[in-house]
Amino acid sequence: MEITINGDKATVDGVKISVSDLLKARNVDMPDMVSVEVNGTILERSEFDSTQVGDGDEVEFLYFMGGGR
């Protein structure tokens, strides 16, 4: 299937995939530190296993960084 991840087109095996499995498939470092938005909706971490991503969906991996003074 074709999806968009952080603005880039990506091909993923299968018809649907859970957000948790997508994070693993994309080798996301420290998935506990990533928020995920699917089609404009930010997910709760508890929804990662149950939310399915399908063909044409738009996914954003949001990385929050600390720092400053």
Image: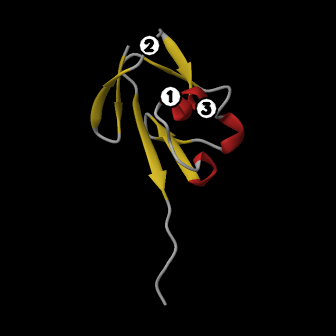
Amino acid identity at mark 1: Ala
**Residue 25's disc number:** 1
The residue pinned by badge 2 equals 13
Position of residue 25 in the picture relative to residue 8 (left or right): right
Position of residue 39 in the picture relative to residue 34 (left or right): left
What residue is rendered at 54% in x and 19% in y?
Answer: 17
* Dot 3 or dot 1, earlier in sequence: 3
Residues at discs 2 and 1 in contact (Cβ within 8 Å): yes
Amino acid identity at mark 3: Ser
Where residue 33 appears, as percent x and y from the top left, is 59, 54
Instruction: Specify few, some or many for label 2: CA neighbours under 10 Å numbering under 14, 14-19, or 20 or more.
Output: few
Closest to the observer, 66 or 26: 26
Q: How many labels does the image show?
A: 3
* Numbered disc 3: secondary structure: helix
Q: Is residue 13 depicted above or below 9 in this figure?
A: above
The residue pinned by badge 3 equals 20
